[in-house]
Amino acid sequence: MSAEPDDALRAINESLDKPSAARIYDYFIGGETNYAIDRAFAEKARERIPQLGEYCRTSRQFLGRTVRWCAAEAGMRQFVDLGSGLPTVGNVHEVADEARPQCDTRVVYTDNEPIALTHSEMLLADTADTDRHVAIAADVMKPDELWSRVMATGLIDRDEPVVMLVNAVLHFLKDEANPDRLLEFYRNQLPPGSLLVLSQMTNENPASESERKALDDLVDYYENTTNPGQLRTSDEFARFFGDFELVDPGLVYAPAWRPDEDTLFARVPSESRVIGGVARKPA
């Protein structure tokens, strides 16, 4: 459900007080829904990590490859994208429908960023089947409310496996926010056979002491945004899959997950600074 016009405008104005992680990400991957405050922040961040834009594009490519595999190879038809961010090239519904020519996929996008929601609604009105694809306002930090809104769309069948996507979101959930509790809740909502797609930036195995310091500096710098965060190693990240069974090739650097001819960092995946995986809920 969308906010009333006055409430939506107020939320948008408030969201422009600080740089937004969603809009910074949009800028880095070549999107157009970002503002001067976001672009200035992004360029300062790029001074710290020159390849930060490539890391963001790597996350987006990972999303596309996993959605394509889930739809075409695993035969999945239901997708819930948590913290979907701003729409850009290669949105979940576009990739899923391309992978399944039957065009029988159903997608629910969720985000609490008012600008992201507004643009998602505009995009879906122009490019999607609004009987199968919707965007809703919901906060991943309020799991009961979010899942109630997802189910209220009427698009998700409780008896059919679901693909839940949490792409490039978890590095904005610090341990103090108890992401373990959140992920446990969301895993519990999924029927057996469902797939969980997770990715985030990592500080694992920096190439040098200067890179380690740069990654720490980047985390400190993001404290000035609406979405401060935390980097994690693979071992720290793996717990978010719970008892789900990782699909081959497992939890890896994102470019190593079924790469194609367009995959960035395919020769040396560890240079991407992005880890991810897909796991299936046991019967």
Image (cartoon, rainbow, N blue to C red):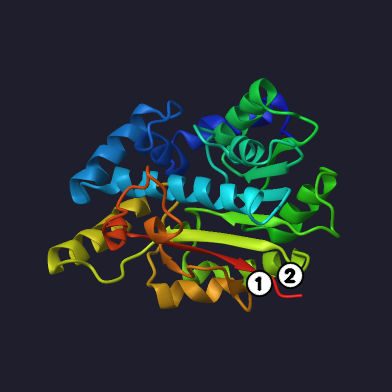
Q: Quadrant of residue 135?
A: top right
- Where's residue 202, x and y in %? 35, 64
Which residue lies at the image location 78% right of the left edge and 65% below the top edge? 191
- Where's residue 175, x and y in %? 48, 71
Tag 2 and tag 1, C-beta contact below 8 Å: yes
Task: Describe the element under mark 2 as helix, strand or loop.
Answer: helix
Image check: 32 left or right of 85? left
- Where's residue 27, x and y in %? 37, 34
Which residue lies at the image location 56% right of the left edge and 68% below the top edge? 247
Q: Residue furthest top?
A: 126
Would you say residue 117 is visible in this rendering? yes
Of the pair 192 and 179, the residue shown nearer to us: 192
Amino acid of disc 1: Glu
Which residue is disc 1 drawn over? 184
Q: Which mark is residue 211?
A: none
Which residue is disc 2 drawn over? 188
Amino acid of disc 2: Asn
Quarter of the rendering occupied by the N terminus: top right
